Amino acid sequence: MDKENKKPTTVVISKLEAKLEAERVRTAAEMEEERKANHRKKVMAALMVSGVVLIIAAVVFFVIIILTGQYRPGQTDPVEDEDDDTTGMVLPSIEGYRCTTELCEKAADLTEDKILIRDTAYFVFNRETREAVKTTIDAVEYRSFTPFNWGDSLLLILERTTGRQGLYSISANRRLTLSFNYTMFERDISAQVYQGMEWVKGVYILARIADEVRLIDIRTGAEVVRAAQRIFAHRDFIIGYEAAGQRRMYTMAGSRVLVAEAGVFVAIYERHLIQITGKQSLTLYDSGGVQVKSSESYYRQLRDRLREVNRQDYMAALRSMSGVFVIPN
């Protein structure tokens, strides 16, 4: 009898527990879903706040750029593809050139419109066109920069801190001299050293290294001739003056042709070098430095001409003929 009465009670309790368990599971699921929803709201809110802060920061930065004058939409960067390590710095502007380093400075006035700027390299900046051209000048310290016109070329003397000088062509954008060994460049065509050879301006220039003088071809930068005292450039030959009156004759390419001691008569006539070796004898060289043989037609023609003028003295004959350049001692 007791067993029959207990069975319904157990069934009722089991149903109640199952119902309570289901309610608990549902409640837990709802709470988890609410927790996830709240987390998503917080994440979205944080993202929105971060976006607003970034926008405000960008606006403030742009306003600062405008107010400090660093924003110049019309100017082209002087150096392309160059890493900028100065982001955020207020860099100087030199006569319209926008610097890219703190050490930027004007090195020299080149012409009315052009200046030389040192920045990441040396640049020629045109103040009219706002164009900056990178040069091949070594990016090192120099004591001075001296620009000057030589013929149709704009040249620049670069003086190192040691006092030694080199020559650079702004027009050709290349270094002319191979080294910085020179102590002076003769850049005044009216100076005594150029007397009688003013035609060399734009073609050759005289330079000095200590007590020596050098003739430099500005088209190639090569030293053509060197001499102890002075150099004279004729249009067909170059004469180098050494100690004790010695003269050394060279072709225009710099090949030595003849060495004449003091007192020896040497002249240039019709693109030939003539050395008088006796009253009625001579040695003859062409403009390439090749000795003309006495059997050749030009040698015989010149000899006959000299005899017509003065058969006894070739030196006197040459001195009296027009077109003859007597090389002075």
Image (cartoon, rainbow, N blue to C red):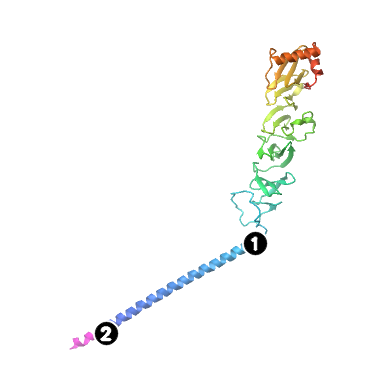
Left or right relative to 289: residue 14: left
What residue sits 81% from the left and 13% below the top?
A: 310
Viewed as shown, does residue 158 lie left or right of 50? right
Quadrant in which the C terminus appears: top right
The stretch in magenta equals 1-13
Query: Can residue 329 be seen at all in this image of the molecule?
Result: no
- 155 or 182: nearer the viewer: 155
Tell me which numbered mark, 2 or 1, is placed earlier along the sequence. 2
Q: Quadrant of residue 263?
A: top right
Amino acid under disc 1: Ile
Residue at 48% x, 72% y is 41
Q: Which residue is mark 1?
A: 64
Is any part of residue 318 visible from this angle? yes
Residue 243: image tag: none
Secondary element at tag 2: helix
Q: Secondary structure beneath disc 1?
A: helix
In this view of the protein, which residue sits in the foreground, 213 or 150?
150
Mark 1 residue crowding within 10 angstroms, few (<14) / some (14–19) / many (20+): few
* Magenta span main SS: helix
Q: Position of residue 295 (x, y in %)?
A: 69, 12
